[in-house]
Image (tube, helix red, strand yellow):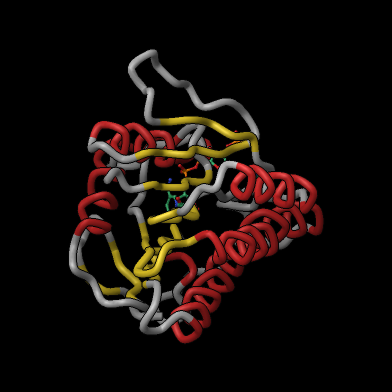
């Protein structure tokens, strides 16, 4: 039987590349984002549902869709995030609130609302960043973005403890990837397809729950 993947941030960047890869590999894929995800005529095992993680009503509406459609999820990939203060040096209140609304509050409450719909032995993949590691941080930029990923990492740890023996959790750094996350990302060494392939291969592998994984380097990251 086909496995079902639920993926946030499927409209562009790494999420869109992952969306295509899961379809190509025979999964049923539900992609979500605020704007449409491009679906080709051959993508008949995929659909796009609108979801704004910064809006609790949107999260509730999405859960109703999952309940009404009796969907059971095998893999939840929390990929959507924003980084309005990336490459800036001081915290700015607006971008701080926006970042936390999407990357932390939205991602946590969305995940909580999906837990009842996740199959036994299901997987939760949190796309974080090495920028969220306290252990390796030697810089002082991107305050909100870094802190939001550190908070996501802690949520991964808490979920790992809560779901032990049932579902597994992995926290992934996708590498520095050419996407629209910031203007500076044009200089990134990895294409979104390369990054998605690394993440996809990791998800298929026999990893231990609770891992914080550098997908391109294929090594664990210190928290
Ligand atoms: N690119 C890198 O170098 C890099 C490095 C480390 C970690 N990451 C992480 O990798 C993940 C993907 O990043 P990316 O570079 O592919 O970014 P991206 O190209 O900017 O794509 C972000 C995705 O998130 C969605 N999104 C943003 N805000 C949302 C909201 N409020 N509700 C729902 N969806 C929302 C966007 O769709 P809509 O705008 O249509 O909603 C889009 O599909 C993120 O978690 C990012 O932090 C990226």
Q: Position of residue 119 (x, y in %)?
A: 42, 63
In the depicted view, which residue is nearer to us: 156 or 70?
70
The total of numbered circles placed on residues is 0
Rendered view: 90 above or below 159 = above
Q: Position of residue 200 (x, y in %)?
A: 26, 49
Residue drawn 79% across and 48% down? Answer: 57
Residue drawn 45% across and 54% down? Answer: 73
Rendered view: 195 above or below 97 = above
Q: Position of residue 67 (x, y in %)?
A: 62, 50
Describe residue 205's horizontal placement relative to residue 16 as left or right: left
Rendered view: 11 above or below 87 = above
Residue drawn 58% across and 73% down? Answer: 151
Residue 48 appears in the rendering: yes
In the depicted view, which residue is nearer to us: 192 or 124?
124
Rendered view: 168 above or below 199 = below
Residue 141 appears in the rendering: no
């Amino acid at each position: 039987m086909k496995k079902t993947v639920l993926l946030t941030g499927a409209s562009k960047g790494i999420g869109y590349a992952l969306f295509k890869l899961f379809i190509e590999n025979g999964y049923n894929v539900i992609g979500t984002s605020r704007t449409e995800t491009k679906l080709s005529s051959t993508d008949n095992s995929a659909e796009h549902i609108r979801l704004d993680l910064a809006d609790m009503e949107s999260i509730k509406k999405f859960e109703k869709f999952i309940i009404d459609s009796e969907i059971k999820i095998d893999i939840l990939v929390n990929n959507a995030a924003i980084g309005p203060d990336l490459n800036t040096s001081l915290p700015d209140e607006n971008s701080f609130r926006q970042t936390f609304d999407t990357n932390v509050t939205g991602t946590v409450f969305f995940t909580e609302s999906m837990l009842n719909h996740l199959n036994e032995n299901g997987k939760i993949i949190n796309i974080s960043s090495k920028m969220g590691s306290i252990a390796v941080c030697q810089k002082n930029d991107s305050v909100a973005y870094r802190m939001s990923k550190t908070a996501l990492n802690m949520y991964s740890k808490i979920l790992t403890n809560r779901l032990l023996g049932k579902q597994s959790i992995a926290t992934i750094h996708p590498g520095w990837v050419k996407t629209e996350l910031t203007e500076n990302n044009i200089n990134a060494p990895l294409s979104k397809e390369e990054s998605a392939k690394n993440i996809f291969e990791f998800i298929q592998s026999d990893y231990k729950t609770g891992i914080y994984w550098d997908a391109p380097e294929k090594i664990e990251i210190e928290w």
